[in-house]
Amino acid sequence: MTDVTPGIAPDRPQLEGLEDKWSAHWADEGIYSFNRPSSRDQVFSIDTPPPTVSGSLHVGHVFSYTHTDVIARYKRMCGLEVFYPMGWDDNGLPTERRVQNYYGVRCDATLPYDPDFTPPANPDPKKQIPISRRNFIELCEELTTVDEKVFENLWRHLGLSVDWDQLYATISPTAIRISQAAFLRNLARGEAYLDYAPTMWDVTDSTAVAQAEIVDKEHPGFYHRVSFHQLDGTPVYIETTRPELLVSVCALIAHPNDERYQNLIGSTVCDPLFGIEIPVLAHHAAEMDKGAGIAMCCTFGDKTDVQWWRELNLPTRTVIGRDGRFSRETPQWVVNKDRYEQLSGKTIFSAREATVTMLRETGNLDGEPKPTMRNVSFYERGDKPLEIVASNQWYIRNGGKDEDLRQALLARGAEMTWVPEYMQHRFSDWVNGLNGDWLISRQRFFGVPFPIWYSLDADGNPDFTNPIIPEESALPVDPMSETAPGYTESQREQPGGFTADKDVMDTWATSSLSPQLACGWIRDEELWNLTFPMDMAPQAHDIIRTWLFSRVVRANAENGCLPWATATLSGFVMDPDRKKMSKSQGNVVVPTEILEKYGSDAVRWRAAMARPGADSPFDETQMKVGRRLATKILNASKLVLNLPESDPESWSLDQVTNPVDLAMLADLRQVVTTATSFLEKYEYTDALEVAERFFWTFCDDYIEFVKERSYGQDSAGTPSADTLSARSALGIALGVQLRLFAPYCPFVTEEVWRWWNITSIHRSSWPTPAELSDSGDPAVLSTISQALIAIRGAKSAAKTSMKTPVDSMIISGKPEVLAHLKSVESDLRAVSHLTAEISWTESDNDLSFEVHLASP
RNA sequence: GGGCGUAUGGCGCAGCGGUAGCGCGCUUCGUUCACACCGAAGAGGUCACUGGUUCAAACCCAGUUACGCCCACCA
């Protein structure tokens, strides 16, 4: 343990190295440990966002986590035990992708485990080596461990006051157990269900994705005008951007009121290539002014197709497989089998080319394809358009199909406190716009397995309607390696035996349980009762529709309450051109460099200047301002601590008798009240501003004004009462201000605090008005400021030194204002270097000064 | 197309009914006994636009424009 010796300030105090020095101390001393108190009301618990460790941290994260830390430190100083865990979101697709790229491997679940496998030294991302599921998961675990250490080091360097003993990870056995238990309870209550339905499918990663993960992007395409044929050969033209889906066509759809197609509706037509006979049907969702006004309905080209397929009871003609390729088997509804040969096994892109070629050859392409830009759905991390594929998937009810639940969740949104308030709109907009339940299953590997088996009938077909589930006490389970209850392992995959559900839960299905996970649900009842429902849920505003909403869904279902009382939202850090920072744009600012350059306190100061919810442009010059504050704190403290015969033990409110000193403390008293009320409302920026404004005036006016007196140079022996008054006032004000700044600049305030305190400032108590005198008259201080401005102005106008003596000064003003100045006349004479008497002139006018300088 | 937010000195922001504020930057001057990661003084704005309410509007109301975010639109 490094030695901490209280004492006087060093000669040349520095900011360099404070991060390493104090973060090590804090860890040793357990300053941020959560010590279980006796009751819930002594706790402030925070649902920290678990960062995705496979990603990289950027300045936006640093800002957002700092916002939370400021509140955490404030609450801790207010005497609450702060439950401030950190979580790593390390399961799921992002980790898998990182492992694939980092090691140059891919998971092939059919391969056996190779205990001696070592990843290639020089991975070739283009030639990924197939490895077994278990080998793949081992690499995921290996890499996340490394990544997590990097994250932890950065958080410690930034000064986050998290309790590292409360660390959790979304792939840990505990997280798997919690996720599976919550899922089984959802299942038992009918909130989770398995359904065969069309879902958005990512062909790159070969998995289903949820509504919340879908983003729309502009994507170039072509309108193809294609002719279908009535049975007598008359052509019917449709326009499509997806000609390759012609083989999946189920119907042509026109609007019931469309006069052009009245005679066609109800008839049968034939597609131009495959000999598929389909009906022409009417549906109100067909838009008369779009394309040819009559649409080809395929399974599935877009969401309207899904709607028609469902509402018109159309057949399912899926040809695109989970790998994004056209089925190698010729579908049984295709009549012209040889034509399908041209598509078999092809990617969507190649199949489109082949289809267009065939249309051209047969004369069924009318004119040339016309270019267009269309909005297409993508997985948020994907680069190929999503397909719609019908498959078995697990869902959790989220109000998307259930009006009562939707209303209940909207009510939860209204019940919680939003900082800032208007963010609640984003929540209700999202809930109101849901069009389906929450799809939680993923056809991937590194994730929480569904604790589910299915019995196989005599033909080996699984019975999806009666899943086999384990006892909750048996969790966590891996159905792929553990035997279904009531069966023997030899019956796996055998007719009459059982099979495992091979899917894993999406990472959101686990992170949606972060309050349950962190607070000890079903594993630590005492902790659970002390910390849940939590107090504060911080996050950036982009995550409202995902993490924030999903936690509300889960807590509402499982606990019948909100997961926390208050949601606080941070904005983004934008690049200087006001664009969102993103890897693909290459405009991401790496936090380590900026922390290195300006120091953590400076970066934290800048973060705190970004108000809740507000986006903030990244601007390095702003970091310098924070740096300047930290330096100023260091130097002002040095002055106070290094006054002659400085003795912090003797600082006492009783000694403060001088009117200036009392006025300053009365002013500070007001600052404490204001800052505290801002922090209670999570308005950390306003609290900082009010403290900082005071601090600069304190340095520039107050300290300058009382400096001479505080040195006590007049008294040869014992300091005068006025000198003691200044020293006590300086010391008391310093102690209060350091504590006001402690949540923002934890390093420099701790450094200075320990010059005369044994224990950490971060476990000291938040300043209260009661610590400060209320007998002073703050008007004295503002009168003095006016005097200083007049004196300095005269010297500045004369382009001379501030030390230039003042020959004479005439002060006129109302008697009560003059009285203020008369009471502090000796300080005024000292600061202005006045050599003669002051002439006081009473008048009804505002205060005015006439300053005559000594000739040079 | 719907929702939300933002428009204030060169830049970043505060003010949200009573004579325009802060920080950075800029100009001029000063200084080494807390601090050059310093101090002082100063220049700089018809508060996006158009109407309205009011004795009084940057602030309230209606509308317009621009920008940002979210959602819908995907034949």
Image (tube, coloured by chain):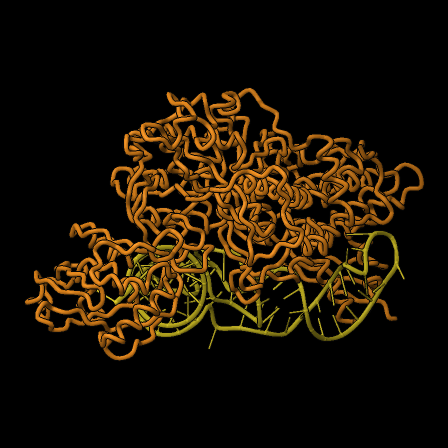
Q: Is residue A301 above or below residue A444?
A: below
Left or right of A855? Residue A289 is: left
Left or right of A677? Residue A821 is: right
What colour has chain B?
yellow
Image quadrant in which the N terminus of chain A is located: top right
Question: Which residue occupies the foreground of this view, A569 or A766?
Answer: A569
- Image quarter of residue A116: top right
Q: In this view, does B73 lie above or below A442?
A: below
Question: Which residue occupies the foreground of this view, A770 or A396?
Answer: A396
The spot of residue A694 in percent (x, y) is 66, 49
What colour has chain A?
orange
Q: Farthest residue in the right direction?
A: A716
The spot of residue A207 in percent (x, y) is 41, 48
Q: Farthest residue in the bottom direction?
A: A367
Image quadrant in which the C terminus of chain A is located: bottom right
At 25% from the left edge and 61% from the top edge, which residue is drawn?
Answer: A337
Does any portion of residue A242 appear in the rendered image? yes
Left or right of A544? Residue A829 is: right
At 67% from the left edge and 35% from the top edge, which residue is drawn?
Answer: A762
- Image quarter of residue A215: bottom left
Question: Which residue occupies the foreground of this view, A133 or A628?
Answer: A133
